[in-house]
Amino acid sequence: MNELEQYCLSVAQAAREASRKMALVSGAQKTQWLKASAARLRAETETLLTANKLDLDAAPGYGLTSAMIDRLTLTPQRIEGIAVALEEVAALPNPVGGIIHSTIRPNGIEVQKVRVPLGVIFFIYESRPNVTADAAALCVKSGNAVILRGGKEAIHSSQAIVNLLCEEAIKAGLPENAIQFVNTIDRDAVGYFLKLNQYIDVCIPRGGESLIRRVTADATMPVIKHFNGNCHVYIDKSAPEDMAVKILLNAKTQRMGVCNAAESLVVHRGCAERLLPVLAKALQDKGVEIHGDETTAKLCQNIVPATEEDYKTEYLGPKISCIVVDSIEDAIEHINKYSSGHTEAIVTQDLNAARLFTQAIDSSAVMVNASTRFNDGGEFGLGAEIGISTDKLHARGPCGPEELTTYKYVVYGDGQVRE
């Protein structure tokens, strides 16, 4: 066993030991830690900015784009946002120990289904320092130990945040090594961790599709994930013009490089002549290039002919695919065929159409007369999220504290034996 492999093993073993103690940590202790950590981050703003500058100075050497550098950058306002997020998680109910269901059997035994932590979470994520704090907060809130493996581009910022969180964790009585940050940028470390299923209960990758596919292929433990976000907005024939324009523009252009941004527009033929030229102009005025079918090209100007690949693509930028369909059933078929199972939206005034759409669409979140951008842990009232899952087991959609727990059965008797 080489030195790196030994390091990964020791981190995982320490996390396993900490996880057993975390199961006994009270909700009050976790709340105390979260509030104290928020205050400490505010107090240590200059320390965090100094660490962040080291990452920003190294960013050109990593070939980061301006958008990537922006996500990497910490400011006093962004540090305040991280602190507020910790306080929001603190205000959430403690999920551990919650009774999901309880029943008393005819023989008198009481069977409880009780929420418990997953155990050890290995979290691999992109170069956004705020994600470090969010992930630690959610994992600890749900009673888990966490191993954080952040991107090399943010290693100084993430390490500085984790140092503060760990110091406050000890003060609050949390077990040592409940939060650990992988202190090497060697990519082989990820492979070693993914083999340690005897110590790590679940892996959560958050980043580019290539990273997530690599983790999914190599992991020996369950993975909570989504590969990409090919999200659709369907404009039904009864859709009001002002609502359709407002929702589509927000879904596509409010922030283009995120997984819940719209990548495809589907329009009912019954309203295409009335609405599609207006929708297309609104998108083009925002700099969005439309890749559309023949009907779209006939009704609108400056349309790029759409290919099969366009309907599969998560652009993460100023492009969108577009197709005109004959019915809501055709819209549903198109969306379920090309969707990545992330988020879909319908704009309609027809209650029956809305019901059919929500029942038939197979995605983690379905929006009725609302933007796809709402598929987010904070927007759903989870406080924050460690990621969005397009899986069906174990979690689906934004993953907050409850999604980072499982359950076990606890049975109370009074001397009963099975006949």
Image: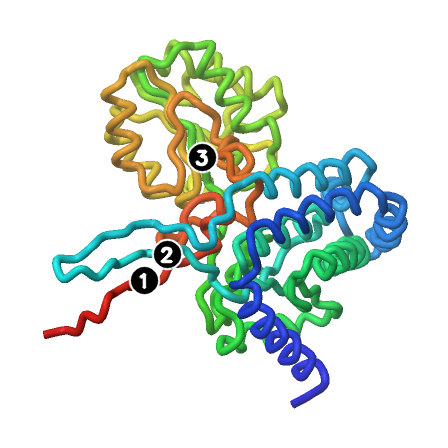
Q: Which residue is mark 2?
A: 114
Q: Residue furthest bottom?
A: 1
Q: Name the residue located 31 percent from the left edge and 19 percent from the top edge.
A: 269
- Taking 300 as reference, is 410 above or below it? below
Q: Nearer the viewer, mark 1 or mark 3?
A: 1
Q: Secondary structure at mark 1?
A: strand
CB under 8 Å between callouts 2 and 3? no
Q: Which quadrant does the C terminus fall into?
A: bottom left
Q: CA distance from mark 1 to mark 2?
A: 6 Å
Does residue 352 appear in the picture of this structure? Answer: yes
* Residue 222 - label: none
**The quadrant where residue 307 appears:** top left
Does residue 315 appear in the picture of this structure? Answer: no
CB under 8 Å between callouts 1 and 2? yes
Q: Name the residue located 54 percent from the left edge and 54 percent from the top edge.
A: 209
Q: Which residue is mark 3?
A: 306
Taking depth in this image into account, of 385 and 215 the one nearest to the observer is: 385
- Taking 159 as reference, is 381 above or below it? above
Looking at marks 1 and 2 on the same chain, the residue that comes earlier in the sequence is marked by 2
Looking at marks 2 and 3 on the same chain, the residue that comes earlier in the sequence is marked by 2
Mark 2 packing: few (<14 Cα in 10 Å), some, or many (20+)?
A: some
Q: Secondary structure at mark 2?
A: strand
Position of residue 49 in the picture relative to residue 183 (left or right): right
Q: Give, as a three-letter code, the residue at label 2.
A: Val
Q: Which quadrant does the N terminus fall into?
A: bottom right
> Percent from the top left, x then y, of residue 84?
69, 37
- Taking 127 as reference, is 360 above or below it? above
Q: Which residue is mark 1?
A: 409
